[in-house]
Amino acid sequence: LIDLDQFKLINDTFGHLAGDAVLVRLSERVHHCLRDGDMLARLDGDEFGVIMRNCSIETAARIAGRLRDAISRFEFRWEERPIQVSASIGVIEVNQATQDAARLMQQVDLLCYEAKEQGRNQVRVQADSGESSMRRQQEMDWVQRIKEAIAEERLRFHGQLIAPANGDQWRCELLVRLEDRDGRLFTASSFMEAAERYHVARMIDQWVVSKALEILPGMIKSFPRIVSWHVNLSGQSVNCSSVLPELLAAIDRASLPPGALCFEITESAAMHSIDEAREFFSALRTAGCEVALDDFGKGLSTFDYLKQLPVDLVKIDGGFVRELAHSELDHAMVRSIHEIARIAGMRTVAESVESIELILRLKQIGVDLLQGHAIHSPTNLEQLQMPADKDIPAQLESY
């Protein structure tokens, strides 16, 4: 399978006529690289399929390498402007054991995704055995389960309260759960890595936004002490140019109170393209939403991003919080993140708060908000209840 890299940019930059002309010339070049009897077909807008009969996987891999090189050397000019093309290629063996054509296409498609992850202009060949092959198969299964769950309306929200270290302005994060056909619930940690790797995370994001905007008017009325509801967006949405206009239109139609909706986006997603992330975050804030930078502290240039990104909250990665009481280094990291965020005008949220001792340490540092099982465990929204006391953390001063 030949999947052209970033072909949409050619259409967007030069126009669809230029894109079509490139495809015609490119198919001619690819055909010249094949053996007599090999079959070439265009499968989709920017995908070509090649069937090589009586060909070992080793020979197919060598031919795929030649195809990649030929495509990358491809020279095309449109109205005196040069156009460069590259391709990510997946190679898979078809033999007597192959029975499911749809599964075969899914497997080779995933190989192309892996090639793109490695930097594009790569060839990926399926391994017949081993740990990587098993992992790929497991992730493929998750991709299918995600698609089925969305189609069959089996995604759910669970709510986890976020407590103020002081005061009564609570928050709640809406966490995605996937309900299997047998009723088992899976957290996002079970399937989001596969969703991100194989480009179905945007499908989950679309459900998250649609469902959140549908239920929030009622949730806001039922829980007046919750000032903001948090939802998560993947990096795929942040880095897709078509998502932001659709998202802003949906937010506008919902007419939520300012600050009632907070989008959490991981630091790693923002790092992928800082300029796109800055534009995305700014637009959300202009629309009356808040933005939280999630899992903060994992990146190598962490503090520099606080200067560049317009965010309201910084969620300190749980890896620093869990051992805070026993690690001077983690304590110093959390304190530094909080101080720098405070100077930048941002509030801090500590994730993975699992004990009373951690709550007290975090309150001493000055962290603004606390989230974890010591505060509240995620529960389905029908069972969500506010604590009886207005300020649970205040009770802990006696410890």
Image (cartoon, rainbow, N blue to C red):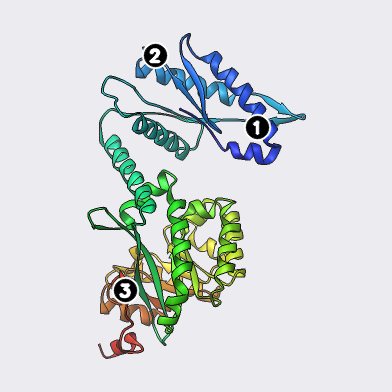
Sequence-first tag of 2 and 1: 1
- As drawn, which residue projects farthest toward the front? 152
According to the image, label 2 marks what residue? Answer: 53
What residue type is disc 3 on? Glu
Residue 308 in sight in this render: no
Q: CA distance from mark 1 to mark 3?
A: 51 Å
Depth check: give the residue in front, 210 or 279.
Answer: 210
- Mark in front: 1 vs 3: 3
Q: CA distance from mark 2 to mark 1?
A: 30 Å
Q: Is residue 303 left or right of residue 173?
A: right
- As drawn, which residue projects farthest toward the top? 36
Going 40% across and 86% down the picture, which residue do you hit? 166
Pointer 1 and pointer 3: residues touching (CB < 8 Å)? no
- Numbered mark located on residue 282 in the image: none
Q: CA distance from mark 3 to mark 2?
A: 57 Å
Sequence-first tag of 1 and 3: 1
User: Quarter-wise, where is residue 187 in the image?
Assistant: bottom left
According to the image, label 3 marks what residue? Answer: 382
Q: Is residue 44 left or right of residue 172?
A: right
Depth check: give the residue in front, 86 or 144.
Answer: 144
Going 70% across and 37% down the picture, which residue do you hit? 15
User: Quarter-wise, where is residue 318 in the image?
Assistant: bottom left
Q: Position of residue 114 (x, y in %)?
A: 42, 37
Q: In terms of secondary structure, where does tag 1 sit? A: helix
Going 30% across and 36% down the picture, which residue do you hit? 132
According to the image, label 1 marks what residue? Answer: 19
Sequence-first tag of 3 and 2: 2
Q: Position of residue 118 (x, y in %)?
A: 45, 37
Q: Residues within 10 Å of mark 1 (few under 14, many from 20)?
A: many
- Vertical relation: 360 (above or below) 317: below
Pointer 2 and pointer 1: residues touching (CB < 8 Å)? no
